[in-house]
Amino acid sequence: MYSISKENPFKQIISFLIIMLISSLIFIGLSFLTAYLIWGSETMKNLGDFSNPDVIATLKYIQGWSHIGIFTIPPMVFALLSGHGILGYLNGKKIPDVQHFLMALGLIIIILPIIGKLAEWNLAMRLPHWLSGIELWMKESEEAAKIATEAIVKTSTISGLSANLLIMAILPAIGEEFLFRGFLMRYFSSFVKNIHLNIIIVSIIFSALHLQFYGFLPRMALGILLGYLFYWSGSIWLPIVVHFANNAMTVIVYYLAEVGKINIDAEDFGNINNNYLLIINIIILGLGFYWFEKHKDNANIFER
């Protein structure tokens, strides 16, 4: 029986990119078409008007379906063509035990201040003067993305919160983990034999494809954690749950701030200014890594 996963790496990645292109065009195209039919031409012409509730609803709708087409469907189709089935190829047949889930969720809490510090360093980075034009473009793009994201995520209703959790936590957790940990880590394993290098490469790609330069380092750090959780557990479900928890915390903090339950800037959530506490967090994170290394259960993680 033919299996696309038995082809050489070049043919595999070309095949995957073709699948991704077709899936993206179909889902993005259909999302815009159906959005036009649902909300009408006036809304579609004014997608930059974030004060319009219909625009926000349209953007969420398009973002959700586009994300499925770009991230979720391609690895699933490739997995089916591999002959191993979706769960078999993407390491979804095994469910980690409760202890692993609790430890992993603890790590995402512990790493928050570290990610915050990396974000601070990232924001302080400056390009050489001769690249000032590119730096200005990156800052403007980052600010535009921030405004759009805040407009979408801010809500004071339970229905809005539920929609945000679906669009910004559930779908990204499943789709991005299927793509980056489920597909790419397996793909690179065929010619990158060092698992640590594999995790770092995929984390760099994971961060770069978000196209947010000033969030590159913190997102890369998150990708490294998710990569190791996948490697240690041998299951895609552990990084999916942790990825969901990370995104859901941000969504919920925005909601609580919007309804006046907390008085905190969502972007500052988890940050600490005390360097001694930061060092303690790093030590605890290291101990958590050590625990997972001693309790890893990843036999045949990339078996073909």
Image (cartoon, grey):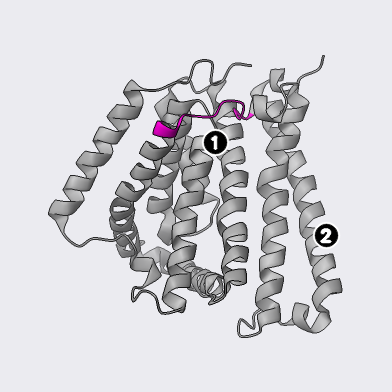
Classify 10 Å Cα crowding around label 1: few (below 14), some (14-19), many (20 and above). many
Q: Which residues are magenta?
A: 90-99
Seen at 66% across and 67% down, the residue is 60
The reply to whether residue 136 is visible in this rendering is no
Residue 74 screen position, x and y as percent = 72, 40
Helix, strand or loop for the magenta stretch, by majority: loop
Seen at 47% across and 36% down, the residue is 201
Q: Is residue 143 above or below residue 82?
A: below
Q: Is residue 115 above or below residue 16?
A: below
Label 2: which residue? Answer: 30
Identify residue type, mark 2: Leu
Q: Is residue 91 magenta?
A: yes
Q: Is residue 236 above or below residue 167?
A: above
Mark whose residue sits in front, 1 or 2: 1
Residue 58 screen position, x and y as percent = 71, 72
In the picture, which quadrant includes the C terminus?
A: top right
